[in-house]
Image: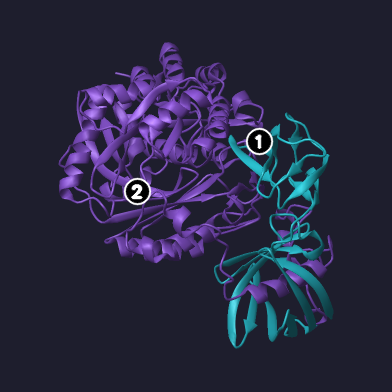
Amino acid sequence: MPAVRKVLIANRGEIAVRIIRTCRAMGVTSVAVYSEADTDAPHVRLADEAVAVGPPPARESYLVVETLIAAAQASGADAVHPGYGFLAENAGFARAVNDAGLTFIGPPPQAIATMGDKVAARALMEKAGVPVVPATGVLPPNADAFAGAAEALGFPVVIKAAAGGGGKGMRIVRRLDQLPEAVAGAAREATAAFGDGRIYLERYLERPRHVEVQVFGDTHGTVVHLGERECSIQRRHQKIVEESPSPAVDATLRAAMTDAGIRAAAAVDYVGAGTIEFLLDAHGRFYFLEMNTRLQVEHPVTEWITGLDLVREQILVARGERLSFGQSIATRGHALECRLYSEDPAHGFLPATGTVHVLGEPSGAWVRFDSGIAVGSTIGVDYDPLLAKLSVYGATREEARTRMLAALRETVLLGVVTNRDYLLAVLEHPAFAAGATHTEFLAEHFAGWTPAAGRHRDTAAVLAALALAGPGTRRDDGGANAAVLPTPWESLGAWRPGAGTR
Amino acid sequence: MSVQKTVVVDGTPRAVQVVGRDDALTARVDEATFELALARGGNGWRVTRDSRTVTATVVRDRDVVWVALDGEIHRCVAGDDARTGGAGGGVRSPKLIAPMPGKVLAVRVEVGQQVAAGDPLVVLEAMKMETIVGADGDARVKEVLVAAGAMVEPGQVLIVLEFD
């Protein structure tokens, strides 16, 4: 049986921090890796050891298989956890880890490869009796090939990357004349994101819900589901709010969906944590979308309602142990997660950059903040703009929703534009409160959104005017916190606006 | 003390005037006039207005001031720099700027070309996502200042237009 006593985490940000914490709790030694942009990152500080893996661009550091394997071997690690993103769903990486005599904390390479090829996965799912959305195979990347296929399927259609995920290389097309630009853009984006430009076409379902089933398998042939998560609140096909259970799923539908999820996992002899994504239409029909062969960003909502630590279970399974739970595991209550991104929802979700000057983290009963940032962190363009995940639990959905609103208001990050106020507006929306969620929710309710004025905008204007009028570099307290405030910015806390306090 | 400034608060320019001492300030923001008192408190400020006191955290990063007040977050920019960091309130600009740092994937127009509102002019890539920079209105392309493959900084001028 593999030992798994020392784990190299081939990732960064909040997920690296989250995995390191479980390693700590299990007495497993953790090894972080970091690029030159992440020298002082929280995951590096938290890990027992850390190895530098190269320059800031991910393709020169976090995506270099040989460097990561060498780092694992040099540090004496016996296992590698890939997190999500980066190399997590790269079968070649999983194989290289195994070939180096290390344990890959994830599914067998063959399962990753099969599910990673969206076209092969569809065919396999059809064979396994899992419902799929009508689609073509891979098509040559030109408008003519796609035009014929699109007419046969019926508009609207969606172009997808065969190697895809995360909305990259994806384009919804509603009219024939939109095809040329969409085909070219999707192929280009797929090549840039995955190094694989193959694309295909699928019928686009209007206003479906995105509902996914968490599965877990061990090496003793057990596959168990952990209920569903609904992740319908998406911008640019990227999830921003997730919850479990889904407000649209009753016991009968849950039985059907989780059964399909287990069939899907069993079809690839799945081991470890995996997620089968479905689209659910208004009539309760669901279709296989794809399987994510890794730990999911939104796994904390499942942890809230099951009481499990999914990373712990991953490590146990990697050691060859049996799952610590069976299908009789009970879920309770309701959990919600919001993703805090460095992006500007009022301006097309453009990525925002900057330095985290102030970070107020929410806390309290049933509140969890998984973060990969700290005061002083620089947010650049080299990596995914996910800063942190805020998740909460409540006995009911409404209790969880109001708890999330309070926790979001407590989340104060100054120095980088974030989507916090947008998340607040989504959670406050009557349609969200009513559970009337679908993947077009943001497009329908939040197009052209701008932040509410707030009660204190005028007061903020006054404080800003005073700060801007103040001396640029002078500090007249000479105080103890001078050392912790980096130049060239300054805090009003060290600056006297008027004569009255001199 | 007397301060007079234009501050762009969350994208909207506001005319601000402040006179008085910290503990008794009179402020005018556009058409609204109100009294304000400031006192140091903890790591920030206690701000009293209409007998209600809230805590404020204020940090300045060059020309940007971040204000956290009672759970609200406001991003404020010195008036002269209104164009940086997004729309300044519907004013169309002849200069198309890069909204974020990234790489130019494609330039779709040439000097002298006529373009319509919304036409894609430049395709940028950042964080593996493509962003299309389009024209604010019907215009003629006056200058093209970048080429495919170039790395650009936020605020960098990409294309100069002449509106019809």
Q: Residues within 10 Å of mark 1 (few under 14, many from 20)?
A: some
Residue A326: quarter of image? top left
Q: Residue at x 71, y 52 (%)?
A: B136
Residue A85 lies, in percent from the top left, at: 48, 32
Quarter of the figure with the C terminus of chain A: bottom right
Task: Residue A7: tell me if it is visible.
Answer: no
Q: Is residue B48 left or right of residue A271?
A: right
Q: How many marks?
A: 2
Task: Residue B72: tell me if it is visible.
Answer: yes
Residue at the disc numbered 2: A301
In this view of the protein, which residue sits in the foreground, A20 or B103? Answer: B103
Q: Residue furthest top?
A: A99
Residue A6 lies, in percent from the top left, at: 43, 26
Q: Secondary structure at mark 2?
A: helix
Q: Secondary structure at mark 1?
A: helix
Query: Between tags 2 and 1, which lies in front?
Result: 2
Residue type (three-letter) at the residue carrying disc 2: Val
Q: Is residue A217 left or right of residue B13?
A: left
In this view of the protein, which residue sits in the foreground, B57 or A237? Answer: A237
For the colour purple, the matching chain is A
Residue type (three-letter) at the residue carrying disc 1: Ala
Give the mark nearest the N terminus, 2 or 1.
1
Determine whether A469 is above or below A212 in the image: below
Residue at the disc numbered 1: A37
Q: Residues within 10 Å of mark 2 (few under 14, many from 20)?
A: many
Q: Which mark is residue B72?
A: none
Quarter of the figure with the N terminus of chain A: top left
* Chain B shade: cyan
Tags 2 and 1 on a common chain: yes
Residue A112 lies, in percent from the top left, at: 37, 22
Q: Residue at x 66, y 55 (%)?
A: A415
